[in-house]
Amino acid sequence: MKKATYFLLCSALALVSCEGILNKEPLGTLDAGSFFQTAGDAVQAVNAAYGALPISNSNNNFYWGFAELCSDEAVVGGDGSRPGLTELDFFTFTPRTQEFNDFWVLNYKGITQCNTVLDKVPAIVMDETLKSRLLGEAYFLRAWYYYLLAQTFGDVPLLVKLTPPDELKVPKTPRSEVFRQVIADCETAAALLPLQHPAADVGRATRGAALALAAKTSLYQQTWEQVLGYVSQVKALNMYALMADYEDNFRELTQNNSESVWEIQHANLELGVGNSLNQWWASKKFGGGYGFAEVTPEYVSTFEPGDPRRQFTVASNNENYFGLIYKNSFSSTKFSPRKYLQTDSSATQKADGDINYTAIRYAEVLLWEAEALAMLNRVAEAQAPLELVRARARAQATDPATALPPVVVADQQAMIDAVRHERQVELGFEMHRYFDLVRWGLAAQKLPDFKVGKHEVFPLPQQELDLNPALLQNPGY
């Protein structure tokens, strides 16, 4: 299914360029009285709230670097033109690492736009069904941006209304409270959002996305029964199912499919809304790729014999690589990522690909369910969602009779380990691994440079500390 792109284009044009969140007026307060008059104004304002989502050069969105380069799945490659990526790989990052500042500003701009919508749109005289949907999108997007900030930085300032510049210098809010706000916003969004959108609006937030984000946030809070409750609500929508072909989640013409719960749209319009991973992750031997991420041999070794997901996730010697034959020389590790990349013939610019980033797949929802059940020592029940994920992969194996046997264990820790393994191989290079290791308490075991008591969160950007004396730096930085 080819995705709609019009509201992404509006987002790119409407989102203001990145500057410090404290040194400019909030979005939406500039001549707001004359702007927020019609339904069209409301739609345009919500479109702009999507603008912080794309993983693109225009956004300088290097969230993937936090999740992958800090993990055991990838090491930094490229030519050293982005020193911050090297700092992430070797844990030498500081409050002045540019990628943190860019990410902080990007997400707070998205939050400010959401707060603008929630403040101004209710007063517009317009179709109430459309108004409710637009407000639901704003609640969800605000939840998403705060989830990312709290996941990355821990405690962050929580702003849930339009705030004048002289009131922006506020202290951090504890992460637990931010997560509670995320879940509250998701609950509100779920009550307002539709199950799905017509073709012209594919990619907008849905009820399932809101419930799924509430489940994922509950996972970070380790409220296991709450995870199961939200997963149950997602499943009860009867909207989602695993695709028979795993790779359909990463192909241009099969995106926004039945497995997609929350999919961040990218478009090859040469207007800054394309997927720059197509250039950042591609080997330097592949038409102008930067090779910023190279796959570790240790990650490749985690795949069980015959697991077809390895070749869908990682390019290896003598395999097809988007029209080329991959060779060991394509990467210093002999392996490169495949996800989110495409042939040169299908994108007019390398840095402007149109493979979407599926931030939440139904496979991950099933694995949340398995993890929560395992943590509650309901081991036999955890086998069912885990087996659904493994069975899909098994069916694509060269020899399904011998590949990926069902996990049948009675021991709680064995099941926990099995679910964690499955997350790594099923969701590899989908920007989850580092944060998984941290929340499991395994980062120090897996990552030699990780310091307990410091690296569980990243440093607050120095620019924000300079602008806001009420902020305190995270410990260790």
Image: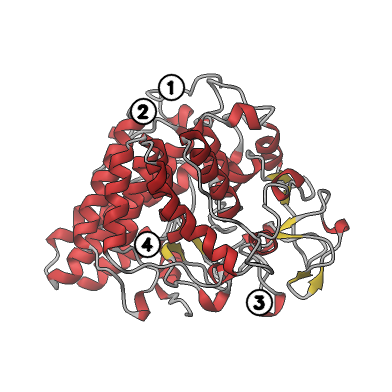
Which residue is pictured at 73% across the width and 72% down the height? 322
Which numbered disc, 4 or 2, marks the residue closer to the eye? 2
Real-space CA distance between mark 2 and mark 3, rounded to the nearest whole angstrom: 43 Å
Measuring from the top left, give residue 307's x and y in whole percent: 66, 59
Q: Earlier in the sequence, mark 1 or mark 3?
A: 3
Q: Which residue is mark 1?
A: 472
Real-space CA distance between mark 2 and mark 1, rounded to the nearest whole angstrom: 7 Å
Quick check: marks 2 and 1 in contact, CB under 8 Å? yes
The amino acid type, in three-letter code, at marker 1 is Leu
Mark number for residue 48?
4
The amino acid type, in three-letter code, at marker 2 is Lys
Mark number for residue 35?
none
Q: Quadrant of residue 311?
A: bottom right
Mark number for residue 172?
2
Measuring from the top left, give residue 34's x and y in whole percent: 21, 63
The amino acid type, in three-letter code, at marker 3 is Thr
Front-lying residue, 269 or 448: 448
- Which element is circle 1 on? loop
Q: Earlier in the sequence, mark 1 or mark 4?
A: 4
Measuring from the top left, give residue 170's x and y in whole percent: 32, 29
Q: Which residue is mark 3?
A: 348
